[in-house]
Structure formats: structure tokens, C-alpha cells
Amino acid sequence: MSMAYKLAHDQAGTLKEYTIRFLKRQITYEPLWAVRDVTFDVAQGEVLGIIGPNGAGKTTLMMVVAGVLPPTEGRVITRGRLSPLIALGAGFNDEMTAYENIVKYGTLLGRDPAHMHERVRPILAWAELEGYLDVPIRSLSSGMRARLSFAVATDIDPDILIVDEVLAVGDEAFRDKSMGRMQELMDGGSSVLLVSHNLDPVEELAHRVLWLHHGEVVADGDPADVIRGYRETARAGAAPRRARP
């Protein structure tokens, strides 16, 4: 699978000018390949760690897998119920209360609104935010939002869980609790795609690790071996050798 963004060569100063240029086909684009020729499988109950520097294409890859972005080339096949946790709180509305956001966010994830109304209090309890039922979400700290978002996303037992940088947010207690919840899901047969710059939990949880650099696969294999190679390359400041030409 490959994914490219379009970069416009000619910038228009106003919407009117852009519309005129667009209709006259005067705007040209250059593809920016965020992910290029990436292929992998994830078995039931398997945890695939995905690592790489900023700009490696990790989040773009997860957004394509989640169905948020269509691939430019190739295809993605998923089977079962998918729960993406890519941008914490991305579905939250700052002016709505925690109660309203839980129902809205769960609905965006494909769940029945009536079911979400019933799950509000258990979700708040897991997130340790029982006293914030009617508080606007803007009043919550980033750590509170992270706990709430994670609690909503993992309130069901998804077949596929996508976790992008969640373990880098929040305090140590939250990270430990999140890892415990992910372990429960894995024990129950959920497949997990785990993206993080925090390599220790990736090495601890993942069965395999996929290393990306500039959107291409550098390595896909044993977590300890791949992470060791990634760290050595980062320390040396060298460009990694690709898994294929």
C-alpha cells in the first residue's frame, strides 16, 4: 500500500482565485509519498509495534488502516470490529460536556448511541473522572482527555485496536493502566497496532516490530533486534539501510 498527499505548485491568495485557477486547470500538483510500498499482515491476537522517527509515515499508515484516508495505491483489508485511537480526543467538542462527548465519540466509532448512554458512567469510572460528568471538555487537562478518549475507545473488545502515541500521554499510573487494558484485549484475541516513540513498552508488548523511515520499511521482525538496530542508527545519525531496494 502507498499513500501520497498532493502538494500544489501554485498558491492562490483567495478562494475566488483558487476556484478560477482550478476550473481553468492552472493548478498543478506534486505527490508527496508519506507511505510507499508497505506490506504486512497482523494475525488475530498479535501485537505489531510500529516505530520510526518523526515524518516516517507512522500516523498516515494508521489512518489508512483505520479507513480515515483512502490509499493512493494498493489496498487494506481488515476483518472484524476496528477501534482506532490515533489522535486522542480528535472526536471531542470542547464546548460539549464529558457526558455528551462520550456518546458522540462512541457513535463516531460506530457504536449505538443508546448503548453509549448506558456506558457513560462506567467509562468515566475507568478514566477516574466520575466528578466530570457535566463539565465541558475544555476544562479537562490533556491527561484527563487522554484517559477519557482511551476509556471510550477500549470500552468494547475490538478485533483490531489501533493505538498511536497513547502511551506517550498522561502520567505513569495512566500508562500502566492503559498497558494493562491492552494486555486484557490481547489475551481476549484482539490484534493491536501499536505506534510509539517510547520503545520500552513496544519491546515489552509487541510480537513483531515494523520500522519505517521516510514511508518505507527498513525492517520487520523480532522486537529486540529491530529496536536495537533503530537505536544504533539513531545514535550514529546515519540513514538506515532499507529492507529492500
Image (cartoon, rainbow, N blue to C red):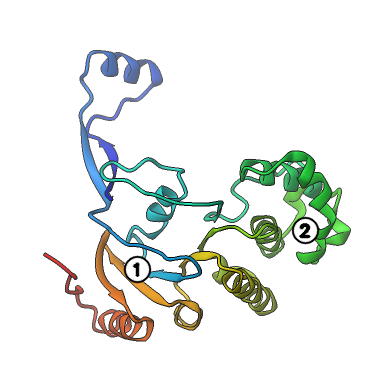
User: In this image, 38 relative to 182: left or right?
Assistant: left
- Kindly identify which numbered label has been placed on residue 53: 1
Name the quadrant of the C terminus: bottom left
Place of residue 13 in the rendered image (x, y in percent of width and height, measured from the top left)? 35, 25
Residue 239 higher or lower than 34, as above or below? below
Place of residue 135 in the rendered image (x, y in percent of width and height, measured from the top left)? 83, 50
Circle 2 crowding by C-alpha within 10 Å: few under 14, some 14–19, many from 20: many
Q: State how many labels appear.
A: 2
Q: Which of these two is toward me, 175 or 117? A: 117
Q: Give the mark, 1 or 2, whose residue is nearer the N terminus.
A: 1
Mark 1 residue type? Pro
Residue at 44% x, 51% y is 78
The residue that mark 2 highlights is 123
Q: CA distance from mark 1 to mark 2?
A: 33 Å
User: In this image, 163 relative to 178: left or right?
Assistant: left
| Residue 242 seen in render | yes
Residue at 64% x, 70% y is 170
Residue 43: quadrant of the picture: bottom left
